[in-house]
Image (cartoon, rainbow, N blue to C red):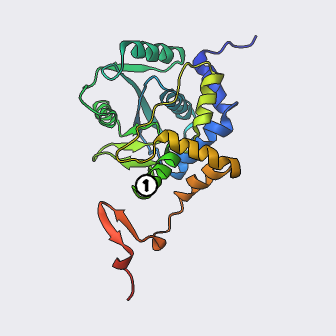
Amino acid sequence: MRRTLTAGQMAERSINKRFRKELWNPLIAAVKRYALIRENDRILVLLEENAESFLMAKLFQTLHRHSEVPFDVAFVLDTGAVSRTSADTVTHLAETLDIPLHTVCGPADKTAAERLLWHARERRCSCAAAPDTLHSVIETLVQCMLSGNGIRGIPPKEWAGESVQIIRPLYCIRDTDIQAFCRYNALPLSLKEREEGQNTGFSRTEVRALLEQLKKTNPAVEDELFSAVHDVCLETMVAWTEKGQAKSFLDTYAF
């Protein structure tokens, strides 16, 4: 007799089977290439009513069962940052998907990034997972360049204070594949609305429209832009910033 799987088990099976190429393999590639997880790390996943946070939760649950590197994960809902309806939705989906959820009312006077860091410290986590995807990286790069804000990317991980690292497990995963995962598993979730940032001459919507137009003549344009942030040659740059200090090619130029 075939064993009946729960919705959570079905979601994990879809990660390993149906979306192995689109979700599981890019996760493993990011974890290994960028050394996202260290031995005995404790990782915070802040669950919100969006597709990225729930995918991160199921990816980490699946990875926790198969990883050779021991680590722990804490799944948290901040009721102080969402509406009652949204909190109820997150709680229901977490129960449906077998995600053990800790409900906490955090401080209301903090930004999203500050809340993430606050909860990581409260739960004694060494890492906090941010929901940035491959498309987040590409859009940020293009938006900054077109808006005159320099060539800026999003790192796969970074320190936020002395004790907590921000890691980005979805770094190599596409938005379209996250949406497909939600549709396949009948999850009523949309992608998180991305912040525009400051002093941007082009909106995210305009950048996406531009990328879609470029894909008509070069279908690989997103892959090439993503590869570009991994192959920056400083020897060809006029000026850049390193650890908060302005640098120039004249600093080391042999006159």
Tell me if residue 252 comes above or below residue 162 in the rendering: below
**Residue 80: x, y in percent?**
30, 20
**Residue 34: x, y in percent?**
50, 51
Q: Nearer the viewer, residue 50 or 126?
A: 50
- In the displayed structure image, the side of residue 216 where residue 39 appears, left or right: left
The quadrant of the rendering that contains the C terminus is bottom left
Q: Residue at x 63, y 52 (%)?
A: 221
Give the structural element (helix, strand or loop) at label 1.
loop
Q: Quadrant of residue 209?
A: top right
Residue furthest bottom as drawn: 255
- In the displayed structure image, the side of residue 49 where residue 173 appears, left or right: right
Judge whether residue 118 can be spotted in this image.
yes
Q: Nearer the viewer, residue 49 or 23?
A: 49
Judge whether residue 134 can be spotted in this image.
no
- In the displayed structure image, the side of residue 74 where residue 137 appears, left or right: right
Tell me if residue 114 comes above or below residue 190 in the rendering: below
For label 1, the crowd category at 10 Å Cα-Cα, with few meaning under 14, some 14 to 19 and many 20 or more, is: some
**Residue 21: x, y in percent?**
68, 39
| Total marks in image | 1
Q: Quadrant of residue 197?
A: top left
Callout 1 amino acid: Arg
**Residue 1: x, y in percent?**
76, 10
Q: Nearer the viewer, residue 2 or 49?
A: 49
Residue at the spot of label 1 = 152
- In the displayed structure image, the side of residue 5 where residue 203 appears, left or right: left
Tell me if residue 251 comes above or below residue 47 in the rendering: below
Q: Residue at x 61, y 55 (%)?
A: 224
Q: Residue at x 61, y 37 (%)?
A: 23
Residue furthest right as drawn: 1
Q: Residue at x 34, y 69 (%)?
A: 247
